[in-house]
Amino acid sequence: VPFKDLAPLPASKYSIQVFPAAAQSYRPAFVYLPLNDYEAVQDAKEAFEVSIQGKELLMKKEYRENIAGNWADFVTLIDKDTKQDVLMNLVKDGYFMVKDRRKKNKILTEYKNAQEIAKKKRVSWYLDII
């Protein structure tokens, strides 16, 4: 298309105020990292990247929480091909720890069970302290 044939879009229909932001931020549900251990955090980030790289994932919003005045959505990620929960597998391998939540549900119980498997295997020293 020649430049002379281009025209700006009408601001009343196509402005930043009309369209919400396209990108959204999500947080992993039910899990956290030992923030006082830089190496463990780096290992967990690397394991997460490896576990999702080149895969098609399904995301499920599990809950919403207010953190310092901002609402955050917490999600689980399911590998489309294997139907396995990516984060739960990382919990089983000892990379993540499971949060204690007041509201219990089936998925949280499964995450707690995965953490117990990791503890029994003694895959990570910081699981011994929780």
Image (tube, grey):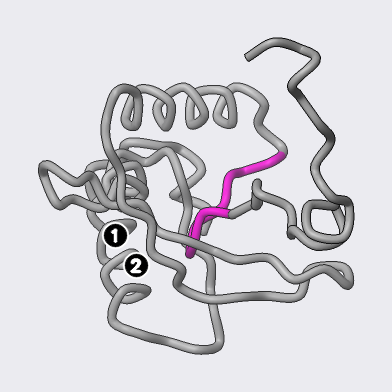
Q: Nearer the viewer, mark 1 or mark 2?
A: 2
Q: Report x, y in % for residue 114.
A: 27, 58
29 lies left or right of 34: left
Comparing 54 with 128, the one in front is 54
Few, some or many residues within 10 Å of mark 2 (<14, 14–19, 20+): many
Q: Report x, y in % for residue 17.
A: 87, 60
* Mark 1 and mark 2: Cα distance apart in space: 6 Å
Marks 1 and 2: CB-CB under 8 Å?
yes
- Amino acid marked by disc 1: Glu
Q: Residue furthest left?
A: 82
83 lies left or right of 73: left
Residue at 38% over, 56% down: 59
Q: Which residue is mark 2?
A: 112
Quadrant in the rendering for residue 95: top left
In the image, residue 98 sits, relative to residue 84, either above or below, namely: below
SS at badge 2: helix
Few, some or many residues within 10 Å of mark 1 (<14, 14–19, 20+): some
Q: Report x, y in % for residue 37.
A: 65, 32
In the image, residue 68 sits, relative to residue 19, either above or below, namely: below
Residue at 55% over, 87% down: 102
Magenta residue check for 116: no
SS at badge 1: helix
- Residue 49 visible in the snapshot: yes
Magenta stretch, residue numbers: 27-35
64 lies left or right of 2: left
Q: Residue furthest top?
A: 2
Q: Which residue is mark 1?
A: 116
Comparing 75 with 58, the one in front is 58
> Quick one: quadrant of the N terminus?
top right
- Amino acid marked by disc 2: Lys
